[in-house]
Image (cartoon, rainbow, N blue to C red):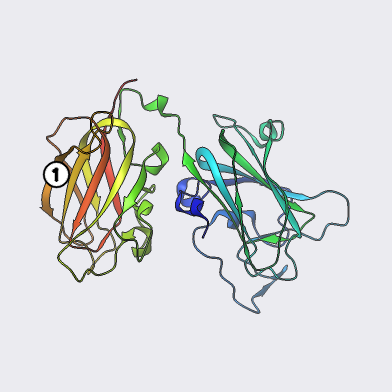
Amino acid sequence: MTEFVRLPDLALRGHGGTVAAASDESFAERESLIRPGRPEFRPHTFGAKGQVYDGWETRRRREQGHDWAIVRLGMPGIVRGVIVDTAWFTGNYPPHASVDACAVDGYPSVAELHDAAWTEIVPRSELTGDAEHHFRVLDERRYTHVRLNIHPDGGVARLRVHGEVVPDLAVWEGMTIDLAALENGGLVTACSNEFYSAPNNVLAPGRARHQADGWETARRRDDGNDWLIVRLACPGTIQVAELDTANLLYNAPAAATLTGMDDRVDPDAWFGLLPRTRLQPDTQHRFRLRERREATHVRLDIHPDGGLARLRLHGLGAGP
């Protein structure tokens, strides 16, 4: 597995991404490109336009050119890798694809995006049918949009754009924000166990839709406990912690602990934020914290194991 897949998908619909425009979507809608989860296929599900695919599919081109789709990243950032997934497309996949990116802040129109300065981040590359194609990106610039080009036409099930979130937090200056949120630049940097689901899920936008939309560990058979470490979006003082066990009815942790650390001072000096506190299943817990020390990282310990839907750490970011 390519290492960049451990980073957040900047384009995911659940992370605020959207497909702003496409050259064509005659057979299957463009919005499918950024849906969460694996593509599905049900044989012999024919509609008025043919077999119904869980992906984006264009008509057969009878003229020069190629098809394309523009995606606004829900979380702008540095792209570290792209996945072009042709799952279930076997006789109708594009033989080649490339990916461009641009940085246009604000809320540009499609016309403005067409006129933007685009940079190729994945050169024209060969594709095969019903396969995930992983492309590493070495560009260090921050981007807000990507454009998938397929040559000349065909179907793509999913487009994944993994990278490091680089938000513009200026709009929140002087205000309380979620210092742990993925969309603000928070990231899980270490985790004891991720058997059932990825730890970065706990920092995703919105409330969890189901059990897999959070972090869940295997059952422990020892005397230890599970944990994860969050690098905050920026150094700050946490005022309220929210631990949400939504959808976790029989696998929520019995208790949780939060500790903080400021790696600008001492990367080994952890201090208490929330003492071991009992949790309830399927409940949105909110705790006001008394500690007013700035932190750059927070460690969540769950006792002994189980799952957490969301972790929110509301507070004030430190000044420059």
Circle 1 residues within 10 Å: few <14, some 14–19, many ≥20: some
In the current view of this chain or complex, which residue is farthest to the top?
A: 320
Residue 262: name its quadrant: top left
Where is residue 25? Give x, y as percent.
70, 56
Q: Which residue type does callout 1 highlight?
A: Leu
Seen in the picture, residue 266 relative to 284 is either above or below; the reply is above
Estimate the x, y position of residue 71 in percent, counting from the top left: 60, 45
Q: Is residue 105 left or right of residue 194?
A: right
Quadrant housing the C terminus: top left
**Disc 1 secondary structure class:** strand
The location of residue 93, given as percent across then percent down, is 72, 64
Extreme residue toward the right, this view:
63
Q: Residue pushed farthest bottom?
A: 44
User: Picture coordinates of residue 273 (x, y %)?
Assistant: 15, 40
In the picture, residue 168 is in which quadrant? top left
Seen at 29% across and 68% down, the residue is 218
Residue at point 29%, 25% (across, down): 318
Q: How many marks?
A: 1
Identify which residue, 67 or 96, lies in the foreground. 96
> Residue sitting at 64 percent across and 70 percent down?
88
Residue picked out by circle 1: 274
